[in-house]
Structures are given as C-alpha cells and as structure tokens.
C-alpha cells in the first residue's frame, strides 16, 4: 500500500470513528498508533516507541510525554496526544516543556486527525510557538502527504526535514495571512495597498471605503487566474476532440451514439478534471465518454479506470467519485469541481 492509499485508509478510519472515540486512550489505539505504524515504527517496541516517557523540567518532576520516538539511542521525536474531539489551540504548553527538557528535534501535537509539527528554528532547544507544518488527515493534500512521509523511520533525516521546515513554516504563515486579507483585510494591509494606488489622505473614512474594494480585487485576481487556466485547458480539449473526430473513422457503435450531444458544460467539467489530474499523470491518458445519462471521465479509455461521472440534471448537478463509497457531491458550476481536487487526484493516482 503506497503513502496515498495509507492516508486515505486513515481518513476513512477518522470518519468511521467520529463521535465514537471519547477518551484519549481510545484515540491513541484507533488512530495515532496506526499512523506511526504506517510510518514504519514498531509501536509495540517500548525501546523505540516509548510510552509515558519521563521528561522532567526544572522543579517539575515526573513530567511524562505520551510517546517518545527513539532512533540510534537518541530521542528524536516527542508526541503529545489528545482525544479526537479536542481542539488543539493553546494545547502546546506541555509539549513546549517536554521539548526543552530533552534533546528531541521535533515535537508533534495531535488529536488523531490534526497533527501539528514543531521544531526549534528560532532558538536551539526551544520549541517555536507556531508549528512549521499542520496536517489534517481527514482532508490531507497531496503535497502534505509527501511532507508527512518524510517522518517515516526509513526516510527520517533530521537535517533534511529541518531544511524544509523553515520554508514550510513561513509559506504556511504567508498563506494564512493572505487568506485572511482576502476575506477580511485589516487596516494595516489596506493602508499598504492604498499607499500604491491612492494619492489622497488616508482618513478612516477612506480606509473603510476601500476595504471591501481591496478584498474584491484580491478575490478577482484568484478567480481570473483559475479561469485563465481552465479556458486554456478547455480550448485544448476542444482542439483535441476536433482532431480525433477528423482522424478516426466512424464505427457502427459511434453511429449509435450520434444522438448524444456533448454540452459546453460537460466539456468544461472535463477541462477542470484534466487540469486537476495533470499533476498526477500525462493528460493524454485522460479521456471522456459521453453517455445518455451521465458524462464519464476515465483513464486510458478504459471503463474500469473511470475517475468520476458528471450528471447535469434539471434539479441539480452532481458528480460521483470512483472511491470506495462512490461519493456523490453536488455542485453549481463545473469550476466547483476543483474544490475536490485532492480526492480526484488520489483516485487518478490509483491508475498510474
């Protein structure tokens, strides 16, 4: 089972156990230990995956961290656990103390779904306040899978992870900041933008007047970037389809299908999916088949390798994913399919 499949299996476990794991111990057994087992650690070896590791700090004696991971006779990772329903905000104070009391290079705070990864980028042996990486297993992204599996026992390399930790930390903080400004620009950000576009006096009234304008401008930039990529993919799709129709002789089965009309909305959905999957495989392998009842997107023109099916009905539009549950998702516009890029990539990756 590859890393994507393991992540998907754990995500399903989290969904199955939602509202059923009411203690920290149950969360450890059902979710946390299986993850570290997938990362290659022997969770039943108390010299490698040490439960209730003593980490005395100053006058505080008997302090115990839930798990310590030992490699080459050195504590490398500390893991502090909470139960699944716990919010991890402001729950890192214990881990901070444990980190300072040991020679561990990394600390992990988790409730079995969310994993926060910490290190000491700012000051040696003092855990940074913000994590350099936060992963939610139930909604994990492809890029995060790669980062998570850097912590596998076989791949674990302190220098390599530390080198990437700084970029991960500040890219994440930058994304968080810009997301916040897109939705609710603060006064400092609005003043910064106005200093480049507005020559008048920046009174409070002007600040309030331009705040929604700047928010709208930021969101419009993102929308235009996405639309540009989709239009390019859609134009290429239309060109490929036209060329195929000219070069391929018509068969009797194709004549039977001639009553099916492929709509612009269906082609647009195909373009969106093609744009998503291009990060996983060669786009030449991605094709569609239009049926009377649904629009099918598949790999290698093979019915057994379908990725998703698109339905445009008078009452609603929806897609059906080729996952274990044949998940059904409603959408308004074809562009909305992009919101499920991670699930779609994971399905396509099964056919690599």
Image (cartoon, helix red, strand yellow):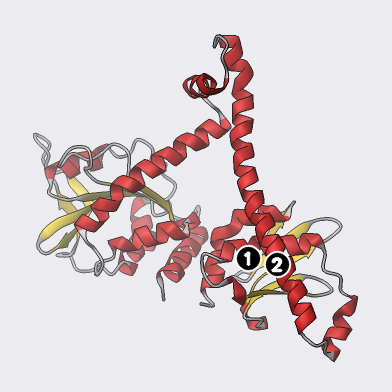
Q: Is residue 327 above or below residue 229?
A: below
Count neighbours of disc 2 (C-alpha within 10 A) and say few if under 14, some if 14 to 19, many if 20 or more. some
> Height in image: 224 above or below 72?
above
Looking at the image, which residue is at 9% across and 62% down?
73
Q: Residue at x 45, y 38 (%)?
A: 176
Q: Position of residue 274 (x, y in %)?
A: 63, 65
Q: Residue at x 34, y 57 (%)?
A: 28
Instruction: Decide: few, some or many residues near mark 1? Use Cα within 10 Å; few <14, some 14-19, many ≥20.
Output: many
Q: Residue sitting at 87 percent across and 74 percent down?
A: 260
Q: Is residue 83 visible?
A: no
Please tell me in which quadrant of the rendered image residue 201 appears.
Answer: top right
In the rendered image, which quarter is residue 67 located in?
bottom left
Q: Nearer the viewer, residue 292 or 77?
A: 292
- Drawn side of residue 340 relative to residue 81, left or right: right
Residue in front for this viewpoint, 78 or 344: 344
Disc 2 target residue: 237
> What is the spatial separation of the Cα atoms under label 2 and label 1, in whole angstroms?
9 Å
């Amino acid at each position: 089972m590859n890393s994507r499949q393991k992540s998907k299996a754990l995500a399903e476990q989290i969904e199955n156990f939602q509202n059923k794991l009411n203690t920290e111990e149950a969360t450890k057994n059902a979710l946390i230990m299986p993850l570290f087992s997938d990362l290659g650690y022997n969770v039943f070896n108390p010299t490698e995956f040490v439960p209730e590791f003593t980490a005395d700090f100053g006058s505080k004696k008997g302090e115990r961290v839930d798990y310590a991971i030992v490699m080459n006779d050195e504590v490398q990772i500390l893991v502090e656990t909470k139960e699944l329903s716990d919010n991890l905000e402001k729950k890192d104070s214990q881990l901070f103390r444990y980190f300072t009391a040991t020679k561990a290079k990394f600390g992990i705070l988790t409730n079995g779904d969310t994993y926060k990864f910490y290190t000491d980028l700012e000051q040696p042996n003092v855990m940074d306040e913000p994590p350099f990486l936060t992963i939610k297993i139930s909604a994990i992204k492809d890029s995060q899978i790669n980062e998570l599996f850097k912590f596998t026992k076989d791949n674990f390399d302190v220098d390599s992870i530390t080198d990437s930790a700084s970029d991960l930390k500040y890219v994440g903080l930058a994304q968080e900041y810009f997301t916040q400004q897109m939705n609710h620009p603060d006064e400092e950000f609005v003043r910064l933008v106005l200093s480049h576009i507005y020559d008048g006096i920046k009174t409070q009234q002007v600040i309030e007047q331009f705040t929604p304008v700047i928010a709208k401008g930021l969101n419009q930039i993102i929308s235009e970037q996405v639309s540009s990529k989709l239009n390019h993919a859609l134009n290429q799709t239309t060109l490929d389809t036209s060329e195929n129709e000219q070069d391929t002789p018509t068969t009797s089965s194709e004549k039977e299908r001639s009553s099916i009309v492929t709509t612009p909305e269906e082609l647009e959905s195909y373009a969106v999916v093609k744009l998503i999957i291009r990060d996983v495989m060669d786009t030449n392998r991605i094709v569609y088949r239009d049926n009377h009842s649904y629009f099918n997107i598949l790999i290698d023109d093979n019915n057994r390798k379908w990725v998703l099916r698109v339905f445009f009905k008078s009452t609603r539009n929806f897609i059906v994913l080729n996952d274990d549950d044949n998940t059904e998702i409603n959408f308004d516009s074809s562009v909305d399919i992009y919101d499920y890029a991670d699930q779609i990539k994971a399905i396509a990756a099964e056919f690599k």
